[in-house]
Amino acid sequence: MSKRQPTSRHDLSVLLGLLTLGLFASPLTGWMARLDLPWYTPYALWAGIVLLGGLLAWRDRRDGT
């Protein structure tokens, strides 16, 4: 039986980068600006991106790759 390959950290990093671009450099930003969101919404989104990046780095260090 073949073992399932774990998802490459580079693949997940690319997905995280695309998520970041989608949130902050797309027409989606204009839509979010028109909503009546709290002032801290962009900061909360950035914090989520940073936490996901930290999780990827921690997972990479734990796997030893």
Image (cartoon, rainbow, N blue to C red):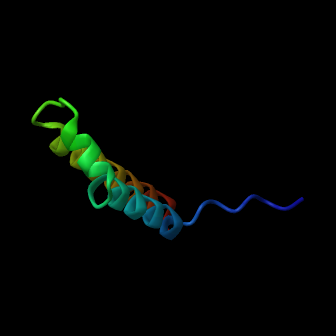
Numbered label tally = 0
Residue 29, image x, y percentages: 26, 50
Residue drawn at 37 percent across, 51 percent down:
55
Place of residue 62 in the rendered image (x, y in percent of width and height, measured from the top left): 45, 57
Query: Quick one: quadrant of the N terminus?
Result: bottom right
Q: Is residue 56 left or right of residue 28?
A: right
Residue at horizontal 49 percent and vertical 70 percent from the top: 10
Residue 17, located in which quarter of the rendered image? bottom left
- Residue 65: x %, y % from top left: 50, 70
Residue farthest to the left, as pictured: 39
**Residue pictured at 56% horizontal, 66% vertical:** 8
Q: Residue furthest right?
A: 1
The quadrant holding residue 37 is top left
Q: Position of residue 43 (x, y in %)?
A: 16, 44
Q: Nearer the viewer, residue 26 or 21?
A: 26
Q: Quadrant of residue 61?
A: bottom left
Using residue 59 as the reference point, say whether residue 43 is left or right of it.
left
64 vs 52, nearest the viewer? 52
Check the image and report above or below for 7 versus 10.
Answer: above
| Drawn side of residue 25 relative to residue 10, left or right | left
Towards the viewer: 44 or 35: 35
